[in-house]
Image (tube, rainbow, N blue to C red):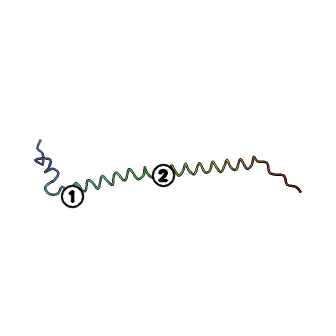
Amino acid sequence: MQFQFEDFASFLAMNGHGPFVWAAYGVALLVLGALVALPLLRQKKLRREFDRQLRQEEARRRAAVQRQERPEPATAD
């Protein structure tokens, strides 16, 4: 098997095109990483928001039940 480049340094340089090639790989990896990370972060944020809303609704329900259970004060007519 014959390799295209003589050594690792010439492989990285790629006959003068190395900076462009490696920059393209870097940008592609950043974009792919963002495509994975951003939905995960958004999902985490939505779950926190959903949990907060559930806690608020449960607190409202408990308050409504407590209001119904309390006897209303008798008024003097």
Foreground residue, 29 or 1?
29
**Image quadrant where one finds the C terminus:** bottom right
Q: Position of residue 13 (x, y in %)?
A: 15, 54
Quadrant of image for the N terminus: top left
Q: Which mark is residue 47?
A: none
> Dot 1 lies on which element?
helix
Indicate the amino acid at tag 2: Lys
Distance from the alpha carbon under mark 1 to that under mark 2: 37 Å
In the rendered structure, are the residues bearing label 1 and label 2 in contact, judged by CB atoms less than 8 Å apart?
A: no
Identity of the residue drawn at 65% across and 51% down = 60
Q: Amino acid at mark 1?
A: Phe
The residue sitting at 29% across, 56% down in the picture is 27
Residue under label 1, please give it.
20
Task: Give the structural element (helix, strand or loop) at label 2.
Answer: helix
Q: Residue furthest right?
A: 77
Going by the image, does 72 lie left or right of 40? right
Percent from the top left, x then y, of residue 22? 22, 54
Label 2 neighbour load within 10 Å: few <14, some 14-19, many 20+: few
Question: Which of disc 2 and disc 1 is earlier in sequence?
Answer: 1
How far from the left and from the top, in percent, is residue 31?
33, 55
How crowded pointer 1 is (Cα within 10 Å; few <14, some 14-19, many 20+) is rated as: few
Q: How many marks?
A: 2
Q: Nearer the viewer, mark 1 or mark 2?
A: 2
Residue at 62% from the left image edge and 50% from the top image edge? 57
Nearer-the-camera pick, 76 or 12: 76
Left or right: residue 28 versus residue 56 is: left
Judging by the rendered image, the residue that carries numbered circle 2 is 45
In this rendering, would 8 be left or right of 50?
Answer: left
Horizontal side of 51 relative to 74 (left or right) equals: left
